[in-house]
Amino acid sequence: MKPLEPSEVEIKKLILLFDKKKFDELLRLSNELLNEFPKSILLHNMQGAVFTELKNYKLAKNLFLKVVNLNPKYTDGYYNLAYIFSKLDQEDKAIENYIKVIKLDSNYFKAHNNLGNIYRKKGLNKKAIECYLSTLEINSNYKVAYYNLAGVLQFHIINKENKYINKYLLSLLKEKIIVRPNSIAPNVLNSLYLNTDLKKNLSLIKNKITNRDFNNVLNNLQKNSLLMQFMKVCPIPDYFIEKNFVKIRKEILNQTYNLKIDKTQIDFLISLSSQCLLNEYIYGQTKDEKEKIKKIDKRIENNLKENKKISDLDILCLSCYEPLTNFSWSNKIKFSDKLKEIFELHLNQNEIENQISKSIKSISKVKNTVSIKVKKQYEENPYPRWENLGLSIEPRSIKDVINDIGLNLDLRKIRNFDSPEILIAGCGTGQHALTTATKYKKSKILALDLSFKSLSYAKRKAEELNINNIDFIQGDILDLKTLDRKFDIIESVGVLHHMDNPFVGLQILTSCLKNDSLMQIGLYSEKARQHIKQIKNKINKLKLNSNYKNIINFRKDLIENNNNQWNFIKSSPDFYTVSGVRDLLFHVQEHRFTISKIKEYLDKLGLIFLGFDGQLVKEKFKDNYTNKDDLYNLNKWEEYENSNPRIFAGMYQFWCKKI
């Protein structure tokens, strides 16, 4: 009987040509073989793959249809066909074919993943999550599915029990570069409440509790691996947890002071210490706590002088109240193996940043009065502290990145720079700069900020993550012209509204932009921040300085105030760190904008509005405005914001182009 397929040698030759992208030769050779093997599934499938690479999707579709007609049980044929239908925007047919793949082979994990992508594109986020979880149940090492799961969890809240989700949330929180923990924090919190006994355990914490009951609570919390990891990587934005952690910390202090703390609780104390350092000791201290801290501090000093063993529990307890750098003995102690993690967080990282700070160059001395005040704020409170970050799976060209954002641009007219030079104007502690550095292929980033402390934090994180295409430099946007450089892209989010004159800042950034190049800007919304404006007015009337004590006490008053107008503040992630509260409510300078004001600025500077960033914001807008051109019409957006004043709660983030 004559074989249906070419020999293994001939197939390997075709695969080699495909890998080398020698498509013309491959098509010529495969057509010759098709004369001999007209019903070859492999040949038709390979030709379909070639035309997929060449973006001739219609021809590829016909070839894959032929493949599944030749063999209705050929899973790869349906998989390839589904991919082509998705490229042709025939999403329902793509779904139909991915489902066929899964019926034929339930363990075909990439089909589950891609099906999730289509559901996500259609706004069916719940179904998308189910698909990504199915993918990971089959292959828990498939990184792409983790990225996709993290992406959809930022736009969909899980509000029902789910026996699978916690272990994958734990995996996401352990990864350094897949997702910012605060962006999935609402889902982590819901999953902790829905799928674990966290609420039950915390409800047992009373003002008076026996040692036995207390130890049982801590043992149960310590077994909650998702909670323990969450505490290490994200300031927990939940007041129920906070107020119970305050009680727990106080009881730990009492037991430590009286030498009655159970040594088995050390892992919980490590997580609590990490959490308190991350939130910058937002919990505050009572007078009684301060006295006991002093006495434990003295006990450690005495033990050190007398060469006595120093208790890990004493050190951990104090580290839950203050950074270890605050204690005179911290650099004299040899830490035990159990405390290596805490030593790294409290002392080693601080020392690394101090050394980095000495190496950072400056443009010039900051002269503007407001800039000097802003610099002082961020030297005292670098914002934000962070551990993990969501970086790109792989860098891409400018055209590919812009295409995904959906800007009002003819992609054919974008210069596809081989090595784009990008300015991050106001990089803070580095989240934006590091994200951009991994987003654009062969990019060279210049990250500018007023604060040496923020820059040192950013550079330390860049070194940790082996990101080496960023130059960090200290200086004011007002002095950028002294660099005498122009950039292919400028990104400045959350910065201009803290300047003395935001228009002058934008004018200078525009002058540093090459013609036909792009700029991303982020500005506070007047309408979205009315509640913040009211609180800032209250702070100004009280004449409160932005010191630690005032921030802690004023925040406490807001928490205890039952006024519903403050609820937006209490739900903000920034409300759960000291630097966050200072940035949110105590900032030395804040301007707020309207869309009309943005339009005025752009017109004056000859900048063309290209569209807003932010998938969720745009999806909500499109529910009301179906004309595609409306997305790029600032008058329509102003109309929409008037009816939805909280839509830009996170800032106006938009792209524009220099003519």
Image (cartoon, rainbow, N blue to C red):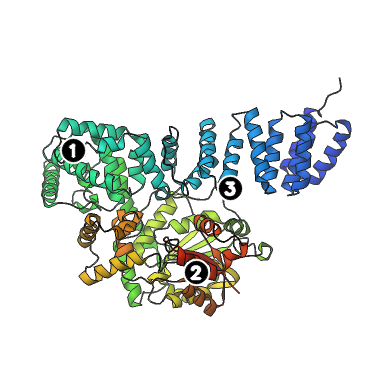
Checking the image for residue 311, the label placed there is 1
Measure how far apart labels 3 and 2 are at the Cα level.
26 Å
Most extreme residue toward the top, as rendered?
1
Q: Earlier in the sequence, mark 3 or mark 2?
A: 3
In this view, the residue in front, 116 or 271, is 116
Q: Secondary structure at mark 2?
A: helix
Most extreme residue toward the bottom, as rendered?
604
Quarter of the image with the C terminus is bottom right
Measure how far apart labels 2 and 1 are at the Cα level.
61 Å
- Residue 331 versus residue 656 in the image, above or below: above
Quarter of the image with the N terminus is top right
Checking the image for residue 122, the label placed there is 3
Residue at 19% from the left image edge and 31% from the top image edge: 213
Residue type at tag 1: Ser
Residue at 65% from the left image edge and 32% from the top image edge: 101
Instruction: Give coordinates of residue 385: x percent, y percent.
Output: 35, 54
Badge 3 crowding class, 10 Å Cα cut-off, few under 14, some 14 to 19, many 20 or more, is few
Foreground mark, 2 or 1?
Answer: 2
Left/right placement of residue 26 relative to residue 195 reads right
Badge 1 crowding class, 10 Å Cα cut-off, few under 14, some 14 to 19, many 20 or more, is some
In this view, the residue in front, 482 or 32, is 32
Badge 2 crowding class, 10 Å Cα cut-off, few under 14, some 14 to 19, many 20 or more, is some
Instruction: Give coordinates of residue 510: x percent, y percent.
Output: 52, 74
> Which quadrant of the figure has residue 167?
top left
Residue type at tag 2: Glu
> Which residue is the site of mark 2?
638
